[in-house]
Amino acid sequence: MAKQPENAAVAIESPDSPDSMFQRGFLADVYNETALGTPEVDKIITRFPPEPNGFLHLGHSKAILINFGFAKFHGGECNLRFDDTNPAGEEDRYFVAIAETVKWLGFEPVKFTYSSDQFDRLYESAEQLINVDGAYVCHCTKPEIEAQRGNRKGGARYACPHRDRPISESLAEFRAMRDGKYSAQAATLRMKQHLESPNPQMWDLTAYRVLEGVYKPMQREYGRLNINGTVLSKRKLKQLVDEGYVRGWDDPRLYTLIALRRRGVPPAAILTFVRELGGVSKATTSIEIKRFESVVRKFLEVTVPRLMLILDPILVVIDNLPDNHLEMIDLAFSKDPGDGSHSVPFTNKVYIDRRDFREVASKDFRRLTPGVTVGLLKVAYPIIATSFEKDETTGLVTIVHASYAKPERDATFKKPKAYIQWVADCPSENSPIKVKVNVYNPLFNSINPEAHPNGFLADINPESEEIYSDALIENGLAEIAERAPWPKTKKANESAGNGVLPESVRFQGMRIGYFCLDSDSTKDKMVVNRIVSLKEDPNKG
């Protein structure tokens, strides 16, 4: 048995330590039970045993972290053991996806094993043993077998009445056991040994039972992880996919791990979420989605760069600047100076978000309206809207005309009370970059979709997806993609060959949320997914 790490005492004193869950409560008890009285065990070997009949979901991340993390913490090993005992629902894509998901979360199995690995070989050996008259099928009850062995109290031992049945009969009965014609304990395959031996291990032991195997490792049950506000049942997930309510198992509105991956949730954030659940116990844990998203948001806040993103653009023409006006504005990628900065162009034509403009001023709105001074982020001087144009058919504002307000030449200049984001129209600097943005909201309306009287499908939120086909983003996206993923220390399990996985290109869209590139992105058309919303002060603007 591996010893506790030398720094274990220090880690135990710090509940914030990533490894504290392996040293407290349930998992500490498992370690102590394993170590006591078993000096022959010199290494902890665990296994993660998923059924390859579907894709893993967020609840499985708990099992993955416990099994792989527990073994790693104690200097042991963990195997990925596919529980492939029900071929009816098993598909090759599930085997591949499970292995890839485990690796994406940052774990490497020592080896891949399968429940079915030894089935054929063991079965063939059993038939060979029957054919050489070394085994027979027995139908005795447990009390009858104990009586044949002298009740283990020194009584007379005698042979099972089935011991001398013909070889062909035992072979036929054994195949009947294999084919499921007998219930549990109705038939067993016993080896012909030495009934007169003083060693009880020679008294015709059982080699095969119906529904029981020979090897049984130590097993400890802990509570599963449930997520409120969604469904995790493979049957229900399959129904959502098959009936077209979502576009596939990796639809970012689902809580399968491949869906969360496509949505841009970092693997380290998922592990942080599990670690912050408060340890491991036998009780089922039910967590609300907002708690999971809060952990993801906190993780992204300090690990991804910031860009200006315009979901629903309106063109602003700054009439008192010349058409050839060009300034390069320096923008920091984050609050961390080590992340560096980049330059974006500022011209007389910029795009702002539709929600940042109103036709009529009001006290509760501090952004752009006619006659109100508003700042453009990091631009030297603010602008004042002077007029606007509207589409006659839709009635929507299409162009806002504004004036660049410099205090030395504008007597009405007032310091702006608000600053808004913008993206310049400057083809020479590859600005703006046009993107399609998918904003994902909860797939279901309630905290418990399965409690709906008409079934969980009746609880689906019709506004679970908002699509902005003409969104614009600043040209800093190109550098973000080249340097992804952020931070560099997380790069190992988010790369594919020589490239970077799209979902690892993450950024904060200022004042909107956290985003990543979608796997459908091409050179000609970028697609962006919102990971989580940006929790904003409700009193702002």
Image: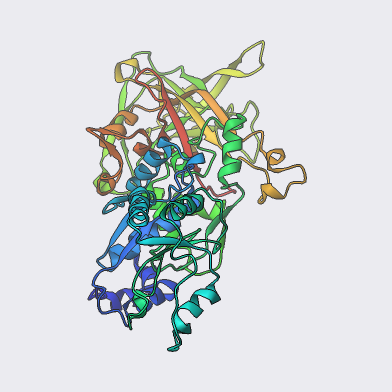
Left or right, residue 150 beside residue 38: right
Q: Is residue 442 visible?
A: no
Q: Is residue 242 visible?
A: yes
Question: In front: 187, or 367?
Answer: 187
Residue at 66%, 51% (x, y): give it: 447
As drawn, which residue projects farthest toward the bottom?
154
**Residue 518 x/y as whole percent:** 42, 31
Question: In front: 148, or 217?
Answer: 148
Compared to residue 375, the image places residue 129 above or below, namely below
Residue at 66%, 38% (x, y): give it: 461
Residue at 26%, 73% (x, y): give it: 41
What colour scheme has been applied to the protein in the rendered image?
rainbow
Question: In front: 334, or 319?
Answer: 334
Which image quadrant is residue 272 in? bottom left
**Residue 356 x/y as whole percent:** 55, 32
Which image quadrant is residue 52 in? top left
Image quarter where the N terminus lies is bottom left
Q: How many numbered callouts?
A: 0
Question: In front: 477, or 82?
Answer: 82
